[in-house]
Image (cartoon, grey):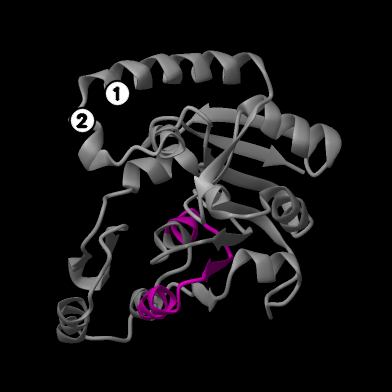
Amino acid sequence: MTENIVTVTKEEVEEFVKTTQFRGYQNITLPYGIIVPGDNLEKESDYLLPETLTGQSVLDIGCDYGFFCHEAKKKGAATVVGLEMNQETAKVSKEIAEIIGDGVEIVHGNVTDLANNNLEIRDNFDTILLLNVVHHLTDPIDIISKVAQLCNKMMIIEFPIPSDNKFLMRKRGYKKEEFYKNPLNKVKFKLEKGFIKLLQKRFPIIGIGGVEYHNTFYFSEKSFDNLFRLHHKSFTKIEFKKSSRKLDRVIAYCEK
């Protein structure tokens, strides 16, 4: 792990945190122990990332404020690039990286441009992270297949499965504030969720949502494995484990 090069004063870091409006998604420790407010993902990082990334190049697609980028650096990665599609989020993420001074590079762009070689970014990475992005994509099969070509060793992909609560509620047209007013909704929802959990365990099914962007494709483990290992041959081996943070989400460790 390389030593961070901090070029800002404590007062400058405090001013950055005070004057920046954060979305509260990622808690990040800055120099002098100053904290970017958000969810603490340290346990998730230890659970999700390999024990060491020494000497590797790492790409985090949909990096938000770059939490996993900086965690990869702590685990010894030689080169880390974070890709973030939201312009304002990317701007804040770049400022955070400059303050921390660990050499993380932030690129403003989206995964579709990356897959179609429309971004000025290095050709290949040893490890690629694609965490909770798949269900926002309109063509995840094509994009994952193309991004896999940029990966030398492993892609780590976290995604929701068809029994995901949000998918089931949106499919039924439920609104959260109205759902709990009718006790019958809970019974229907529980029965449907149980049926889907049984179905996705035994069969390679894909859920297709009805809400643009936030609710597109939901793969069962079997369908994901069949698609990307058997049919597209993007990976030679895929292992799954449950997400440590969110119910009805899984993490796929996809080896090249």
Verify CB contact (< 8 Å) between mark 1 and mark 2. Answer: yes
- Residue 42's x, y, as percent? 33, 47
Of residues 7 and 176, which is closer to you in this image?
Answer: 176
Q: Where on the picture, by quarter, is residue 17?
A: bottom left
Residue tagged by mark 1?
A: 185
Left or right position of 138 against 181: right
> For the residue carrying disc 2, how many other residues have a C-alpha within 10 Å: few (<14), some (14-19), or many (20+)?
few
Q: Which of marks 1 and 2 is nearer the N terminus?
A: 2
Residue at 44% across, 72% down? 102
The boundaries of the magenta stretch are: 71-95
Residue appearing at x 52%, y 45% in the figure = 210
Whether the magenta-drawn stretch holds residue 80 is answered as yes
Q: Can residue 3 be seen in this view?
A: yes
Q: Residue at x 36, y 37 (%)?
A: 245
Q: Are there few (<14), some (14-19), or many (20+) residues within 10 Å of tag 1? A: some
Q: Residue 180 carries which label?
A: 2
Kindly identify the amino acid type of the residue bearing the numbered disc 1.
Asn
Place of residue 220 in the rendered image (x, y in percent of width and height, measured from the top left): 61, 29
